[in-house]
């Protein structure tokens, strides 16, 4: 995976991100909030992994949670910081095994539309789980493998992780099998409570519906 290329493209796209998401009627942020809202308490601490411009965290902030975010795109971090709703933002590459995290324990950790750009996510889940409180919730999205239009995806060296190299922009996109995600959660002693495939957004450029899957696990 070309991490530098992915982050460079993200930086270039940052300024257009919010308007692009609104046009595609992106449902990910609301799906994660709806899944977790019954467990929320004001002043709970939430970590957003790959916070971007903050769209997935804002509903939780409005509820009264303290928001912490990490991201590998400096431009995304700048745009998120300008919205003035986070307690702390850290510029860090989550594909680096010792990526930085705020020095607090979290009640919730979320990741929306990030992990399908990474491939093997086991090190990320392990690192975040260490700072998740007992009984804390982890909720994240992936693109499921084995659901629809998998023909262009090839298996990586990690069983259950598949990739598609979009050569026109030199970008790798990944899909994960259900069994792979369940294995990673089990290895980190996380109890899966729910997973569900959902229509994430409409890609008007490619004229297709894009489906994601969310996983909700408890420590």
Image (cartoon, grey):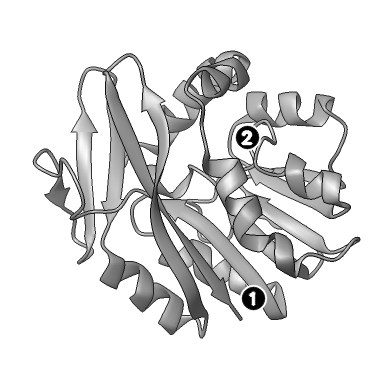
User: To which quarter of the image does residue 21 belong?
Assistant: top right
Q: Position of residue 119 (x, y in %)?
A: 33, 52
Between 129 and 32, the one lying in front of the other is 32
Q: Position of residue 7 (x, y in %)?
A: 49, 31
Residue visible at 56% across and 49% down?
Answer: 31
Q: Which residue is mark 1?
A: 130
* Residue sitting farthest toward the left: 151
Q: Is residue 57 above or below residue 134?
A: above
Answer with left or right where residue 136 lies relative to residue 190: right
Between 89 and 138, the one lying in front of the other is 138
Neighbour tally class for label 2: few under 14, some 14-19, many 20 plus, Cα within 10 Å:
many
Q: Position of residue 106 (x, y in %)?
A: 76, 67
Q: Secondary structure at mark 2?
A: loop
Q: Is residue 14 above or below residue 71?
A: above
**Is residue 24 among the parts visible in the rendering?**
yes
Of callouts 2 and 1, the N-terminal one:
2
Mark seen at residue 52 = 2
Neighbour tally class for label 1: few under 14, some 14-19, many 20 plus, Cα within 10 Å:
few
User: To which quarter of the image does residue 101 belong?
Assistant: bottom right
Q: Position of residue 112 (x, y in %)?
A: 54, 46
Residue visible at 66% across and 62% down?
Answer: 36
Question: Whole-Å distance between the Cαs marked 2 and 1?
Answer: 23 Å
């Amino acid at each position: 995976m070309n991490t530098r290329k992915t982050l460079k493209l993200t930086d270039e796209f940052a300024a257009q991100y919010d308007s692009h998401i609104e046009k595609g009627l992106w449902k990910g942020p609301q799906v994660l909030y709806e899944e977790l809202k019954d467990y929320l308490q004001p002043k709970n601490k939430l970590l957003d992994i790959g916070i971007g411009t903050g769209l997935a965290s804002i509903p939780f902030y409005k509820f009264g949670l303290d928001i912490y975010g990490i991201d590998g795109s400096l431009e995304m971090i700048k745009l998120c910081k300008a919205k003035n709703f986070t307690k702390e933002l850290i510029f860090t590459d989550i594909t680096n095994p010792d990526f930085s995290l705020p020095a607090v324990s979290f009640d919730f950790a979320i990741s929306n539309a990030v992990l399908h750009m990474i491939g093997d996510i086991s090190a990320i889940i392990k690192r975040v789980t260490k700072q998740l409180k007992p009984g804390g919730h982890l909720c994240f999205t992936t693109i499921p493998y084995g659901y629809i239009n998998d023909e262009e995806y090839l298996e990586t060296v990690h069983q259950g992780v598949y990739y598609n190299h979009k050569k026109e922009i030199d970008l790798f996109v990944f899909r994960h099998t259900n069994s792979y995600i369940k294995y990673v959660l089990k290895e980190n002693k996380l109890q899966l409570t729910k997973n569900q495939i959902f229509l994430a957004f409409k890609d008007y450029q490619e004229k297709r519906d894009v489906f994601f899957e969310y996983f909700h696990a408890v420590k």
